[in-house]
């Protein structure tokens, strides 16, 4: 019996027990954060009874000024802990929280089972979807993406960050039952192409055809990210997406401001026209031209989409699949879909699931040539 136990303990941790270390509030420069227990919790080796403040000063972290950890040391919290602070969204974390100083700032790492992290990511990324098979497809895509990018932040002392740079992760409070079930049902399943995990990009709604990644990003393409027609012509799988069709009016005054800020045009230039000048195979715009009083300036559709998104919100221009209608002092963008269009179409996955496809069919459709393996 004891021998068996020892043997079991000596086995390497399988995927089901694999832990993820996620950098929390990773885009923020923090010097302090407030902890609050959710049920039973410990912090700094003591029961956490009420609110306590974790603070960094130089290379030291301290909890309510009492428990200190010197350079290269950490303070830990276990159980359910709410984190909050000035200007921070209040969020609940389970598993373990590891606090330390990094370059004089507070570094917070949430260590938790990989599948719990996946359930958290899927809850956020697939928030509007409903069908269990769509959730399962999203869980496999999210897990594969996480493992592919597992070393993205090794220099910062964790595996993944909690922003969309990796995948959005906002802790345990918003984890949905459906997401947890999807993570459990597909536990350890990873999408492979050749001998390596695939690059499983995904987006909200493709508009009818996913896009070859080389038309969107300046990276070498992947055979399984070449773009596929998303269902029957005229009635794509993702046509069930809310605001599948969208229209946005852009005044030249606003376009001028944006184009100057983005340094596409010079401060004395004025935008007086906008037209598409190149298209990808799906129909998405690849390049645009801004007409000023003295020249035409070429802008990639990806830059344009990101430039507008950052300044006017991501709902203004929802994708790069649009046609441009000219008005007197404005243009109308008449578009379909939402997001970059590369890889899995989330609303298409939902549409396929509603038509009876299983998650394996869905993943094969959006990432052709890949196969599911147990990692
Ligand atoms: Zn990241
Ligand atoms: Zn689609």
Image (cartoon, helix red, strand yellow):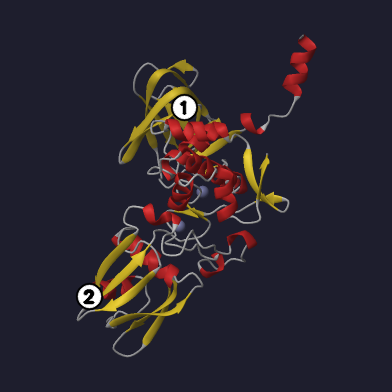
What crowding class fits label 1: few (fewer than 14 Cα within 10 Å), some (14-19), or many (20 or more)?
many
Give whichever of 12, 65 is nearer the camera.
12
Give whichever of 63, 346 is nearer the camera.
346
- Residue plotted at (30% across, 38% down): 86
- Residue denoted by label 2: 253
Q: Position of residue 108 (x, y in %)?
A: 47, 36
Does 254 sit above or below residue 102? below
Classify the position of the N terminus by image quarter: top right
- Residue plotted at (63% across, 43% down): 190
Q: Position of residue 237 (x, y in %)?
A: 44, 55
Mark 1 vs mark 2, CA separation in Å: 48 Å
Classify the position of the C terminus by image quarter: top right
Does 15 sit above or below residue 252? above
Q: Secondary structure at mark 2?
A: helix
> Outermost residue toward the right?
3
- Residue denoted by label 1: 94
Question: Total label count?
Answer: 2
């Amino acid at each position: 019996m004891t021998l068996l136990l020892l043997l079991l303990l000596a086995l390497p941790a399988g995927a089901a027990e694999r832990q993820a270390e996620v950098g929390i509030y990773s885009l923020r420069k923090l010097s302090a954060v407030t902890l609050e227990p959710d049920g039973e919790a410990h912090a700094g080796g003591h029961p956490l009874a009420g609110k306590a403040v974790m603070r960094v000063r130089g290379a030291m972290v301290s909890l309510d000024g009492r428990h200190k950890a010197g350079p290269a040391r950490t303070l830990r919290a276990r159980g359910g802990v709410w984190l909050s602070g000035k200007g921070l969204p209040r969020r609940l974390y389970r598993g373990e929280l590891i606090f330390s100083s990094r370059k004089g700032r507070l570094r917070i790492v949430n260590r938790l089972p990989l599948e719990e992290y996946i359930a958290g990511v899927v809850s956020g990324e697939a928030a509007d979807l409903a069908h269990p098979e769509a959730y399962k497809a999203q869980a496999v895509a999210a897990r594969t993406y996480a493992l592919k990018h597992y070393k993205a932040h090794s220099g910062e002392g964790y595996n993944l960050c909690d922003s969309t740079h990796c995948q959005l992760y906002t802790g345990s409070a918003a984890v949905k039952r459906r997401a947890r079930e999807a993570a459990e049902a597909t536990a350890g399943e990873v999408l492979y192409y050749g001998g390596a995990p695939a690059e499983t990009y995904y987006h909200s709604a493709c508009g009818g055809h996913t896009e070859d990644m080389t038309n969107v990003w300046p990276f070498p393409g992947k055979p399984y990210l070449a773009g596929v027609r998303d269902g029957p012509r005229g009635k794509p799988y993702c046509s069930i997406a809310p605001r599948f069709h969208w229209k946005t009016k852009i005044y030249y005054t606003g376009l001028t401001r944006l184009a100057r800020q983005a340094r596409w045009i010079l401060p004395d230039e004025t935008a007086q026209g906008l037209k598409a000048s190149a298209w990808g195979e799906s129909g998405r715009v690849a390049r645009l031209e801004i007409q000023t009083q003295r020249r035409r300036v070429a802008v990639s559709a990806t830059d344009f989409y990101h430039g507008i998104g950052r300044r006017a919100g991501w709902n203004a221009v929802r994708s790069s699949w649009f046609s441009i209608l000219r008005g007197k002092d404005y243009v109308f963008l008449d578009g379909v879909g939402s997001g970059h269009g590369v890889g899995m179409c989330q609303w298409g996955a939902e549409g396929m699931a509603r038509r009876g496809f299983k998650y394996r069919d869905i993943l094969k459709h959006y990432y052709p040539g890949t196969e599911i393996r147990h990692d």
